[in-house]
């Protein structure tokens, strides 16, 4: 990435830890971002409702979706192979629930 006015690595290091903002119209099409996902309804491929994506936790290795319904919280690994479809228009995500995950990471609320 090149930032206007910062021509060397040393100059760019001054920006370390700063927030980068990009106007939405300049973002690549057909991509989605964390703020697009918050509030989405999450379903399994078989149509079973899991809950609403309330938060994306940055863990270092991979992000984790905090999905909540009226009885529990599920911490779901945000891995490309588990996310089957993201429908921004209808605010709906379809995922594959790994076997045993629900029991392992469901927290009653």
Image (spheres, helix red, strand yellow):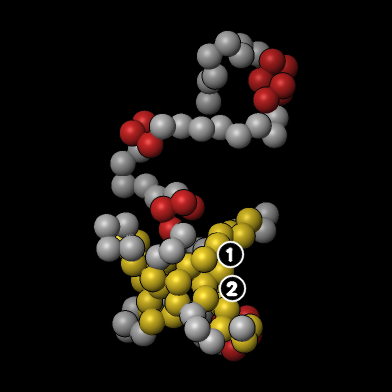
Crowding around mark 1 (Cα neighbors within 10 Å: few <14, some 14 to 19, many 20+) is some
Identify the mark nearer the N-term, 2 or 1: 1
Report the quarter where the C terminus lies: bottom right
Which residue corresponds to mark 2? 75
- The x and y percentages for residue 46 are 32, 84
Q: Nearer the viewer, residue 71 or 78?
A: 71
| Residue sitting at x 53%, y 87% | 71
Contact? badges 2 and 1 (CB < 8 Å): yes
Q: Quadrant of residue 15?
A: top right
| Residue sitting at x 34%, y 78% | 45
Local SS, label 2 = strand
Relative to 106, say whether 61 is above or below.
above
Q: Quadrant of residue 102?
A: bottom right
Q: Nearer the viewer, residue 105 or 55?
A: 55
Q: Is residue 109 left or right of residue 23?
A: right
Relative to 3, say whether 107 is above or below.
below
> How much space separates mark 2 and mark 1, taking CA atoms?
6 Å
Relative to 23, say whether 73 is above or below.
below
Residue 82 shows in the view:
no
| Residue sitting at x 55%, y 62% | 55
Number of on-image labels: 2
- The x and y percentages for residue 48 are 36, 85
| Residue sitting at x 33%, y 63% | 91
- The x and y percentages for residue 21 are 51, 32
Q: Quadrant of residue 49?
A: bottom left
Local SS, label 1 = strand
Relative to 55, say whether 109 is above or below.
below
Crowding around mark 2 (Cα neighbors within 10 Å: few <14, some 14 to 19, many 20+) is many
Which residue corresponds to mark 1? 64
Residue 90 shows in the view:
yes
Q: Is residue 95 left or right of residue 105?
A: left
């Amino acid at each position: 990435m090149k930032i206007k006015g910062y021509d060397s690595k040393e100059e760019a290091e001054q920006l370390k830890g700063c927030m980068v903002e990009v106007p939405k119209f300049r973002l690549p099409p057909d991509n989605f971002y964390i703020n697009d996902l918050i509030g989405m309804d999450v379903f399994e491929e078989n149509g079973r409702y899991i809950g609403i994506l309330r938060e994306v936790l940055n863990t270092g290795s991979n992000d984790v979706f905090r999905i909540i319904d009226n009885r529990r919280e599920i911490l779901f690994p945000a891995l490309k192979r588990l996310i089957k479809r993201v429908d921004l228009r209808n605010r709906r995500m379809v995922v594959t629930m790994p076997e045993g995950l629900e029991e392992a990471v469901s927290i009653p609320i």
